[in-house]
Amino acid sequence: MSLEAPAETSPLAGVADELRAALGDSIIAMDEIWGHLNVRVPPEKRPETLAVLKTLGFDYYDFGCGVDWPDEAVLEVFDNVFSTRQNLRVNVKCRVPRDEPKVPTATTVYAGSDWHERETWELFGIVFVGHPRLRRLLLADWQEGFPMRKDEVLRPRVEKPWPGEFFEA
Amino acid sequence: MTDLQTKGYFTATTERDISTGDMVLNIGPQHPSTHGVLRVVVRLDGERVVEAEPVLGYMHRAFEKLAEQRSPLQNTALFNRLDWISGFCNEVPYCIACEKLAGIEVPKRAQVQRVILFELTRLASHSLVCGVFGLELGALTAPMYGYRDREYALDLLEMVTGQRMHTNWSRIGGVKEDFPEGFYERVPAILEYYRTRVEQWLGFLIDNDVFVERTRGIGVLPQSIALEYGVSGPNLRASGIPMDARKEEEYLGYTDYDFDVPVGEFGDCFDRYVQRVREMWESCNIIEQALDDLGPGPINTGVGRTFKVPAGEIYVRAEGPRGETGYYLISNGGREPYRLKIRTGSFSNISVLPYLLKGIYVPDIVAILGSLDFVVGDVDR
């Protein structure tokens, strides 16, 4: 991502301007991909960014989860919000170090991010500081580790590679 | 004063003094009304729900992790199993995401064929759900009609794809094969059948006093709550918000077709039921127009098995019968996705359960669960 602004004609240009006015230098990167605005902010600015977006008419919390980037030693949290009136979509991303993944909760802004944060917490091990009930959602209690991280491998696939490769070689 | 009173036997008879502690009631994970294995733990004060907590994960199959090890062709087969009642609706958005990243132009004929199957799947799904909702409320004939009606659409799906549920028919760059002979002749009669059934569905339960009493004003979902929790599909539209990805997004050429987006008025269980019946009517309209639109031409661009998705990220959503199904695909240029977030309608739809179940009576729990129309495979992924 770069600091490239969306094109003037894009309907997202207004949103980008408003975000820049409200958050100033906090915006690390911003670009438009496939009609969605991607905004990257520092992790501590996550609730504030979402609160600004909510006042801009982004009333629909669509989904959020995480991505693991082991090469850069970061975990990424993204929140996808949508404006039902203007038909616009913004993806808020923030990156946290892999050894200490902590990010403030967004449940204070969008109550609907509750389950999404619980899922991200158990799958990626990202701690949402201030979340009221950070409990297991999908996994069983006995499961260990954070299965969606890249260093968790699918064991059957390691022991016996997919036979499809045989025909393509 | 009698002896007993002086001895203090009756001192606890006032309502204030009788201690009625809250009772915790466990519903599921094996329960007829949960369409799979959803477990709801409710805390009751007498007959009223004080607090409700859905417990998920009994069908968590880690599709997002599995998808990272599989090629697009294998992935579409996997995503049929997300929401097995509308399998075809889950594989199409993933194909669109890969096609957009790769810049593949899908032939018009393949697009229209996808639309026809997409809407047939919606007809099958909605007619089943309308019937099963009756079962939830004790109307035992309704599911028989529901299952019967669904078979007509599933017959057509089987005719085209060879499968009733897990179709795996959409490919990157088109569809697997052309419609078979005799398909076009069968469709109009089946559409006509569904139209008459829509009217009967409306009368069948709506004229039923018991059904109306059990659903009117029960489980009212306010617009603000629905939006904040990401509720989508018929559940959201029943609350009066005309949000429909078919109108908002450019995919499969849906914007070319003339159809209405019905909305509900109160957002209660009754409206959610009527919403689905009305959407079946619109689906019939779309299929009819799509059949006229179906010109000759190629159905596939011939993308090979070793197709690699170019690097980039994209979010594609589509309007499935249970709300929006979306794929947030991050590709690093390999055959398998680097990261694939699956956004399913049911997951967000039932995240409002703690809100909806608070303060209602126990028998209404089942009515609300049935009206939300979720599939646990879609919730847990």
Image (cartoon, rainbow, N blue to C red):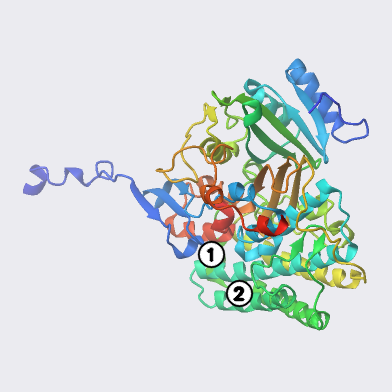
Q: Residue at x 65, y 44 (%)?
A: B230
Q: Position of residue B138 (x, y in %)?
A: 48, 71
Camera-side residue of B75 and B228 = B75
Q: Is residue B221 visible?
A: no
Mark 1 falls on what kind of element? Answer: helix
**Looking at the picture, does residue B184 appear above or below residue A117?**
below
Residue shown at 65%/54% (left/top)? B235
- Tell me if A89 is positioned left or right of B15 in this view: right
Three-letter amino acid code at disc 2?
Gly
Q: Quadrant of the N terminus of chain A?
A: top right
Label 2 packing within 10 angstroms: few (<14), some (14-19), many (20+): many
Report the chain holding disc 2.
B
Q: Which residue is mark 2?
A: B146
- Quarter of the image with the C terminus of chain A is bottom right
- Helix, strand or loop at label 2? It is helix
Question: Residue B213 shows which numbered tag?
Answer: 1
Q: What residue is shown at x 56% (from left), y 46% (from top)?
A: B351
Nearer to me, B100 or A52 = B100
Q: Position of residue B86 (x, y in %)?
A: 66, 64
Amino acid type, residue under disc 1 in the picture = Glu
Q: Residue furthest front?
A: A169
Mark found first going from the N terminus, 1 or 2: 2
